[in-house]
Image (tube, rainbow, N blue to C red):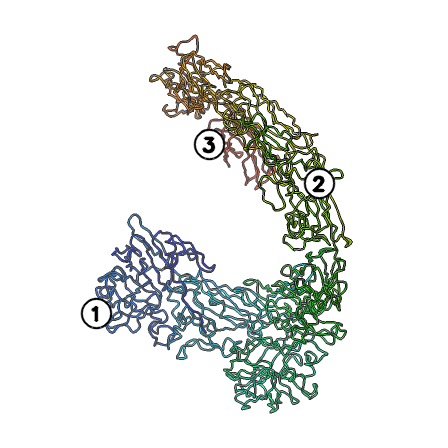
Amino acid sequence: MNNEIGRKITSLTLMTIMLAGGLTFAAPSMMPVAFAANANLFVSAENSQFDNYMSGPQVIEVVVIDSDINDTDEAKGEPDVTVNGKKLRMVQAVDGNWYGYFADRKQASIADFTAIGGGTSAASVPAGNGLDFGTLCATGSRTDAAVGFSVAETVGIALPFTGANGGGSNGTATGAALTLECGGANTASVNGTINVVREAKDPNLTLAGDTNGQIGLNSTNVDGFDHVWPFVQLYNLNPTGNVVVQYNKGGGVQSTTLTFDSVDQFASAVVDSTVYTRDAQVHATITDLWLNIDPTDEDSWTFGTASGSLSTNYQVFDENGLAAGAGVGGGIIDISGNLTNMMIEDNGVLRVNTNTQGAANTVLTIQDNDDSIITCTNAQVATTCSATNNAGGGLAAGTNPVTITEQGPNSGVFGTYDESDKSVFKITSNALRGTSATIDYNETPKSILVGFGFATIDIQPTDDEWTSGEEIPVVLVDSDANKNSRVDEDLDLNNIDVGLIPSLATGDPFTLGEGDSSLRVFVTNSTVNYQVAAAGTTTSLGVNTIATANSTGVLTVQSFSQRGILNVTGSGAVNNAPPGLVKGIFIDLETTQEELAQTIRDNRLSTFTGFNFFNYDVRSLGATSGTVGIYLINDTMPILNNNGLYNANSTNNALALVDNGASQGFVSLNGAAMNAALFDDSTADASTNLGLAIVLNNTGVTLDAREPIVMDFFSFGFTDDGFQADERIANQIIRLELEETGDNTSTFEGSLEYIMVNQININDVNTYSGLSPIADDPNFIVIEDLTDEDSPRVNYLDLGGDGVSTQIADQEEAPSHSGVVSFDQSSYKTADTVIVTLEDLDLNVDSDLIDIFTVVSTASDANRDTVGSGSAANGTGTSVTLTNGDELGRLLDITFDDERWTAANSCGLDSAIDAGLAATGFTLIETGVETGIFTGSFQIPSAWCRSGATASESVTGLDIEVNYVDFRDASGEIIEVGDSAGVRANTGSVSLDRTVYPVPFGTPARYDTNTSSSPASRSLFPIHQTGMDTTAGLQTGEFLEKGGLTIHVRVNDPDFDISASGEDTIAQNKAGTTLGPVKLSVIRGASTVVLGYAGGPTAVAGDIDVGGNNSTTGTQNIRQFGPMVEIAPDAGIFESDILIRYTDGPASSTCPNTDNYVPIDGTANNGNNGYVNRFDAAPSTGDYCILQGDILQVEYTDPADASGDPNTVTDSATFDLRNGVLQSDKSVYIIGSDMILTLIEPDLDLDNDQAETYDLDLIEWDSDAATLTMGNKGGSASNNGAAFDPEPLSFRETGDSTGIFQIVIEIPNTLGGDNLERGEEIVLEYTDWGPSGADYVGNEDEDVNLTIFTSNFGATIELDQKVYTWTDKVYITIVAPDHNFDSNLVDEIGDTDSDPIRVATRGFDIDNYKLVETGTDTGIFTGEVILTGFTHDADGVDGSDTNPRTSADGTGPTDGFLQTDDDDGLTVSFEFSEDETVVGSALIRWNIGEVQWLEASYPASGTGVVRVIDPDMNLDPESVDNFNVDVWSDSDAGGIDLTVTETNEATGIFEGTVFFTTTDESSGHRLRVAEGDTVTAEYEDNTLPDPYTTADELDITATSLIGTVVPPLERAPAANLRTVDAFGNSLDTVAVDQQVQISADLANGQDREQAFAYLVQIQDGNGVTVSLAWITGSLSAGQSFSPALSWIPTQSGSYTATAFVWESVDNPTALSPPVSTTITVQ
């Protein structure tokens, strides 16, 4: 059969294009390794796997991929390609590439001869089959005309046409030369359709004119150009000779050389295994280049493999398995009789012995796959299979036809398997262990041995314990289940090739094997008649009992898995072959209703709570989904009679279990009609026989020889109350369709999951209807604790390696678990959030989802306000009432005082209060997938209804409990567990934000008289008096405008924290009053004023209560601050912010006389308000105010403390005045630097909850330069304070409630036009208007002073050298801390007239030279100046070498240049302060140079380094300088000019390398020397110090030796020549053929590296040298080394070994005298 679609990849063509495009790709491992040795030329036979061989009639494809000629829309010249020097015509295809095909003329002719009847097949063969090369044409003008161009350099051409007058000829048996041309009136050949180039590229037809394929393919034939393309050009190739394919491309020839010869040496066959189990696929891979005929397509070969019927047939099927030669009469062509003439040796023939030992059962059979069309009358017997053509000829039964298909175009690799990896070879189902078959190709047989393996099965828990809802792996390792090595297989139940299915059963499921393991079966192809078809109804089944329509069979039930194997044998009383289309299958279960009743029960009865199900799988039958009917037959007569026929009964004895269903299902048997049909029959169960009928009336099915099916009855639930283990039912069987982990692993994996039932799901049909009892990941029900011997067990009946079927199994405990429920706290208060945590792994019923349990809310339900299931009776759930009165569906509930919290109790509760658990929205939610931990939350209500009560009551003071019914604890029993907590109130507390408060103060607006610039008995805080203007009185800006005190009152009472995450308030009056619960008072002795009340529901604009006498009257003229707000969600702390003014204290004659009060009673502030707008009574004496020492008291009345009773708590603080302090961060400051000024003044900390700011004019600055306040009142002298550059603009408190105020100011350079002097004294003064001991602010004052100074550190100058040369770079460093004006910036000095820097020589200078600070806040300034010398010829060549120049004033810090003289000085001066200057100086002098060789001696062929040290020649300190020196030797007195180059910038050290030579002339830096020469370097110094003049010069020389100062033979002396073994042990004697080492000790006595060659010569007793060997190396200075050379003596005797040490093998200058030793060989 064939179901493959699509076409396989095309030939080398695609491969070569990819290669040419620079692409890389991966090929299957069986494919040959394609390679291309050329950039543009690609030859299909160019293949490293086959060593570039070609053979027989193989067609070779040649492709030229060349971007120069690949345009398809413009004319391009044909590429010049030759085969053995003969032109190969190339055609351009639609892809722009050029293609040509060629073959050997003789082999093509013989091959074509087989396709016209020349093979062993019949003589009449249709065209285009077998090895048809088309029409063979001799060369000549007619042939040229026929194709459209000349092919004269070939010996013929094969064209794909047959025409009436086409000419040409067919091939011959001997492959004789071609004589008939094509074209003209020549008689056409009888067979002319090419079949050896099937997928050639289409020619390019885009160009106009006669230019098809860019070479003029002929298109005049009625068939168009198709009659000449593709054509194969024929050449006379020499067997065993080379075939050279050449592309003569301009710029270089590209060629590939092939070998034309037989290729049996490359032919082989391999199989995928050595041992196979029954029904296993046998994959054979045959590699044979000869079989690769067509380079463009996958070739297909079909062999007759049976002994006596061997045949070789080409293209019986195409690469897709469709009929090719098999599709036409005579199209199957056997060429085996011609193979010896076609370069075949032993290859080309496939032999298969299906039963090598002649065992009772055949070992190997063949089967159809997608690469062929095979028909077998007996799938287990290969000789019954045929692959004949439509005329019935060819590969008939008995030939054992086997088709192999090429795995890719042009690969030469063939397989017996199709693209779905199904092989034509298969082990039979009953093959015997230890028997074998044989596959033989190229006379290399391969054994196919039958054997079995021992299996293991393993349940692998992922952690310590398996829990409900948790998937755990199940792993089966069984080589027998691995039947196909090329695919990963699944153990599908419906696949007959799967021999065994692992299974797991609990309880007593009813299966096919309930009565017997071998059941009788009746099948029919007649329509099964029935009266009704609806599932759950009964009917009678009728069948046509005509013998020809029926047959019998056997259903064999496998152990453990209870899978039935249906085998319709056609034997027995109804002796017919199986009907073609089976419409009915009747199975006699060989058991009775009594046995079925042991599994399923009637759930209409009160004694059983549960469900029944029918599980089936008949997928193997191949029925259309929706056409399957399954009936349970019950009858007092046998289901099948003695003849095997169905005993049709007119009574309604067939119960429809499945009606028009799918081929697999799990169906419920729980309807009323279904229960009635199952259980209401009055006939005794023991007398009622059972059977099953499968009805497939719609279309019927064709049965295979064996069909696996399963049908089972399941039951779940409990009898009575289910309290006892024997009352719990879970009758089920699951089957694991495990999946192989990969190709050929023999390891099959799946998973298991169980669902532990609970009180909610046990009576829910959905718990069971969703089971997957047949799957790779099945799940099953656990109804009680399954541990120890009851643990779930996976069974597998393994056919072991010993040939015996043995049960193997593994089990894993599926335990139940004890649950734990808990509250998150031990006590709660009203409105607290309660978190309930329930931990029970049994409740994790779904491993893929988060499980959730909800609260029953139905009003009439017995489980109302309980987490669980509603009542089944009223349709709200699945709960039933047990015999003890408990509700099955109750999972968890909440109780107060041991009564369930439920809305069922009605007592007139406020509708805003949750009446029960459901009203809260409580839900138990699993914390994650598979955790088994559940949480839910609710809020404690303020009240609840007790059962029978008529009024609600508070829950405060009650116990709260959570109760959980654990349906299965760790022992499998039902228990109830819980947790409890108390609902309690909290004792509140009250606090002020401070224990000491500053005394508040006022403003001039509170007083009618304002003529003084000081307080003058007023509660005021002016700025410093220096900042006052001349206007009388205190004006705006001359006093602190905000003197009110803000206090923060906090109540800590969690009872008012009632929102789960929101912001709460205290907003209720004290019981029995209209005033808030928090009272705020100011107390002085016996006098009291009540400032107001906080925590009430609303704020009230009222008066301060003098004496507190109105506190209980409830009148509305008492001031109230309103609700107190929670400071944060869940804090339980509430705050009120209250402003207290200086007037808000008891009356006293000491108080300042306030004229204008700030009204608080709702009256508008008109600037003339009296006390009546703030107080409820006139002052008894003097006036109202707060004085130092007064007490602030807060009182809170808690409506319910921890005992539940009201309680009053208080807190208090005092008002106090404290002295201010003024501080600075240093005592001495650099002018321009920053000062941190700190004012410590607690009296100004008027708000504990924010950082405050105050005017800088509180501070006076007093120095010689100016006296002024430091803020904007400082006037023009400080630019209104800007001269101090304050940051921030005012004093800012360092944090909330610190009372410490800071500001950063800059020490100014000038104030009021006067410069600040270095060392100047500065006095800062702050006037404290509320010092300690004063009664109120403004009552007294105290001046607080701070003295600081400007710095006067001076400055120093440092130069980096004491003496400079004339062109040096001078590095200047000035340390001037006073000029570090800004510690956050890099400062500069020197470039202004106020701090000038001057850099000068005796004749030149730079003024105002700028230096830059080395970093922030260092006070160290640096710069550099380059000395530029004067005009002078320093190197004695070509005039002056300098560029004398001086920079302009104001430059710096790195761009300064300064001229010098030869004997000069340098001065740097810095005026760091007025009339104060520091100076630094140095000399400028020339130096006498120095010249030296770096080594005392040099080898004659080495290199030497000359060094000149003269700082005067560092003419440019910012670049590398160089100049020339003279170098000569004794051998060459003329010498060379050597350029010496500065080693780096500004080093004044110059080096040059001389290359010594003993053979070449001196040139450049190469100097001719000889051993023993003295070499001299001379430097002319033109920059000489005193007493020399600028006109003087001095020649300075240095010398070195050529050679060594060490005697020549002591440079690397050898010593201790010895014979040693491989471990370095010395040997006295040596054995023949013993490997030894000749070793000596070398030492380099020189102070330089020495190259050497170590040579060992061995001579026998006659002085004949028998061995000479050497090694080379190098010894560093002073190094010792022991080289060794290996020698193996072949004869005994006395030998002398002599060691030489030379400079090299090429230079035999001795470094050591020779050393010798004698070796005795025995």
> If you read the primary sequence from the N terminus, does the residue marked by circle 2 or circle 3 appear first?
2
* Secondary-structure class at tag 3: loop
The one of 777 and 388 positioned closer to us in this rendering: 777
Under mark 1, the amino acid is Gly
Between marks 1 and 3 in the image, the one whose residue lies nearer the viewer: 1
**Label 1 sits on residue:** 184
**Label 2 sits on residue:** 1082
Give the quarter of the figure containing the N terminus: bottom left
The one of 729 and 961 positioned closer to us in this rendering: 961
The one of 73 and 520 positioned closer to us in this rendering: 73
User: Where, by quadrant of the figure, is residue 177 drawn?
Assistant: bottom left
- Left or right: 82, with 1452 as reference point: left
Label 2 and label 1: CA atoms lie apart by 136 Å
Label 1 and label 3: CA atoms lie apart by 80 Å
Label 2 and label 3: CA atoms lie apart by 115 Å
Between marks 2 and 3 in the image, the one whose residue lies nearer the viewer: 2
Under mark 2, the amino acid is Val
Q: Residues within 10 Å of mark 2 (few under 14, many from 20)?
A: many
**Label 3 sits on residue:** 1705
